Amino acid sequence: INLDDWEDSDEGDGSENPDRDYSCYQVEERIMGILATDAFGGAGNLDGNWTTVTAFGNPQQSAGDVQPELVSGTPSLSLYTGISWPNNQYAQFIARAAGGPGQKYIAAILRGVTGERTNYEVRIQSIGASNVVVILRYNTGTSTTGASTSGVPIAAGNTVKGSVVTDGANAIVKLYVNDIEILSWTDTSPLIAGSPGIMLLATGGTADQTRADNWEAGSFGDSVITGSGRQHMGFIYG
């Protein structure tokens, strides 16, 4: 509810008109527009719509999922460059596996560029009953942790989403699990533009212990009025 649109209809002299004792309201919601999807149904490298970031591994399609190219300290990181992207964007994936020995990270990438690592990273660091989730900004390889928390339950099959929206001179970056907001960070030195993508890391065990599926990305953040009405004596009238 946009509280700026509330209107008090008292008479102004301390009395109340029973026919006018109501407040008006509007309901606003942010809308998402899907611009690209990938179910990773092929084999090997991602298709031609993807570009791997310089000096990083190529995410690999395998058995309907995507996984890191190698068990390594270097992540596999690709951006979906097959189309032009709005600055207000989201990216999401279904987490399939992130466990076993070593570090197992999966991240939605926002506003990424294909040269030296510059992007927002909305990351889960495992799958299980209690997990760490992080929002980071990389700027020419230098990382800044914007927000993090622990103890977040994430199960195989959960959807992890990141979004970034310009807010004046800043950018607001958010992390969601199953459309529930978990983290939010206002970046006062924001990245301006770029493409969404995906990052996967496995530093131990096997590459297939870090897997995701059903990547999706699009526009995010435009507000629309989805309802309006008036409230009177605790009741809402459409």
Image (cartoon, helix red, strand yellow):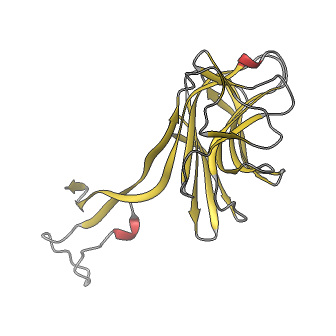
Q: Residue at x 26, y 80 (%)?
A: 14
* Front residue of 28 and 45: 45
Tally the numbered discs.
0
Residue 25 on image: x %, y %: 30, 63
Residue 127 shows in this picture? no
Residue 5 on image: x %, y %: 35, 69
Residue 170, placed above or below residue 213: below
Please identify the residue farthest to the bottom as the structure is shown. 13
Residue 86 shows in this picture? yes
Figure quadrant of the N terminus? bottom left
Residue 115, placed above or below residue 66: below
Left or right for 33, reference 183: left
Left or right for 233, reference 64: left
* Front residue of 103 and 52: 52
Q: Quadrant of residue 48?
A: top right
Q: Residue at x 48, y 56 (%)?
A: 221
Q: Residue at x 39, y 65 (%)?
A: 3
* Front residue of 189 and 236: 189
Figure quadrant of the C terminus? bottom left
Q: Residue at x 64, y 66 (%)?
A: 170
Please identify the residue farthest to the left as the structure is shown. 19
Residue 80 on image: x %, y %: 61, 42
Residue 36, placed above or below residue 127: below
* Front residue of 94 and 2: 94
Please identify the residue farthest to the right as the structure is shown. 73
